[in-house]
Amino acid sequence: MSAASADREPVIIAARRTAIGRAGGAFRGVPAHDLLAPVLRQVLLDTGLQDGQVSDVIMGNAVGGGGNVARLASLTAGLPVGVPGLTVDRQCGSGLEAIVLAARLVAAGAGDAYLAGGVESISTAPARAHRLPDGSLDFYDRAQFAPLWLGDTDVGTAAENVAVRYGISRDRQDQFALRSHRLAVAARSGQAFRTELVELPQLAADQGPRPSLTPELLARFPAAFVPGGTVTAGNSCPYSDGACAVVVTSRAKARQLGAQEALAFVDSAVSGNEPAYLGVGAESSTRELLRRTGERLEDIGLIEFNEAFAAQVLAVLDLLGIDPGRINAQGGALALGHPYGASGAVLVTRLFAQARSGSLPGQTALGMVSIAGGMGISTLFRWEQI
């Protein structure tokens, strides 16, 4: 790599998030742009990046009311009107995709510094409806993910499909969900999330992790999506509200800002798969990423995988040959929650915090998301000294 191209290498030098609240909970009256704005302000303070130095604000969002929440949040945060905004929708992978896009723009020389991440306010998302030929409204719960002839499968039903096809038992799902809660409870109690949280008046700590959860309690949950199935509310993620942002800049700009260490972007891959088995999309995206980078899974130090459903996480781990004990060392979305458009960015924030805490230059870090509609996104980073 030439000195010029090394200077343009994309790096993340700050990563922050709100606490994650249950939908209808602490953030029930807070719209998406008001959740995100204080996080944008905080990552600017963390880095010393001036408002006018921001090239663009790129944010993921999945169930908002349309418009451009990235631009609205940017202006709400007090950034200059000359700073643009872009909202990305790759459903559950939106926040991670926004960060990848910012990294590729830095590498291409399109700008020096980006605020990227995601936000979701399921609590305040507007009701949505199709307008029928007679002008009346037909309200619906979610957008269509796939053409009907291909099977526009709900995510819960798809999780059951995955559990059946790949032989993921109810007991394994419940055990994995319990692990997630216990790790997240321990991390929250030990202040492990302290350096990544932006405390808002409504909520200062994640609402989801349940210290009282036991195997016996999990076993009492009925099937949630398919009669007689194994996917329950206990081994599925809760609907959630939250926001997350990182600063993506070039290595040269990071040095100017005085950064000593950073999470360097290596590469990212996306893939598609059968919509009826949407939960396993991260398998093929991870294989493609490994093929392109030449990395081996056994050499990757940190792995964060979005836990929408225990069934789909375990299926992907089985397919890739990853020990479940290697991922989400401080709990995942089964405990913390899944604010769709922000979740991929939350994975990056978790990787950033853990890498910084370990301070092991050269350590690789992998973020993975399986996405509604049958897609996957996997992104590789490396913790490095600037």
Image (cartoon, rainbow, N blue to C red):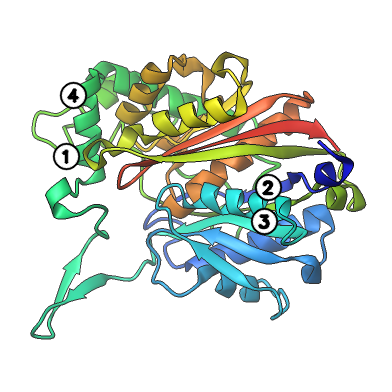
2 or 3: tag closer to the N-terminus:
2
Asked whether, in this view, residue 240 is left or right of residue 261, the answer is: left
How far apart are the alpha carbons under marks 1 and 4?
13 Å
Q: Residue at x 67, y 61 (%)?
A: 40
When asked about the image quadrant of residue 243, the answer is bottom right
Asked whether, in this view, residue 275 is left or right of residue 270, the answer is: left
Q: Please provide percent x and percent y for residue 186.
A: 56, 26
* Type of amino acid at the residue the image marks with label 1: Phe
4 or 3: tag closer to the N-terminus:
3
Q: Using a 10 Å C-alpha cutoff, classify the residue at mark 1 as few (fewer than 14 neighbours), some (14 to 19) or many (20 or more).
A: some
Confirm whether residue 151 shows in the render.
no
Q: Residue at x 42, y 45 (%)?
A: 338
3 or 1: tag closer to the N-terminus:
3
* Type of amino acid at the residue the image marks with label 2: Ala
Q: Residue at x 85, y 53 (%)?
A: 253
Describe the element under mark 2 as helix, strand or loop: strand
The tag on residue 15 is: 2
Asked whether, in this view, residue 84 is left or right of residue 35, the answer is: right
Q: Using a 10 Å C-alpha cutoff, classify the residue at mark 2 as few (fewer than 14 neighbours), some (14 to 19) or many (20 or more).
A: many
The tag on residue 105 is: 3
* Type of amino acid at the residue the image marks with label 3: Leu
For disc 4, the marked residue is 164
Asked whether, in this view, residue 252 is left or right of residue 290, the answer is: right
Residues at circles 4 and 2 in contact by the CB criterion of under 8 Å: no
Q: Please provide percent x and percent y for residue 159.
A: 25, 34
4 or 2: tag closer to the N-terminus:
2
For disc 1, the marked residue is 225
Q: Using a 10 Å C-alpha cutoff, classify the residue at mark 4 as few (fewer than 14 neighbours), some (14 to 19) or many (20 or more).
A: some
Q: Is residue 344 shown above or below 145?
A: above
Q: Is residue 114 shown above or below 68?
A: above
Q: Using a 10 Å C-alpha cutoff, classify the residue at mark 3 as few (fewer than 14 neighbours), some (14 to 19) or many (20 or more).
A: many
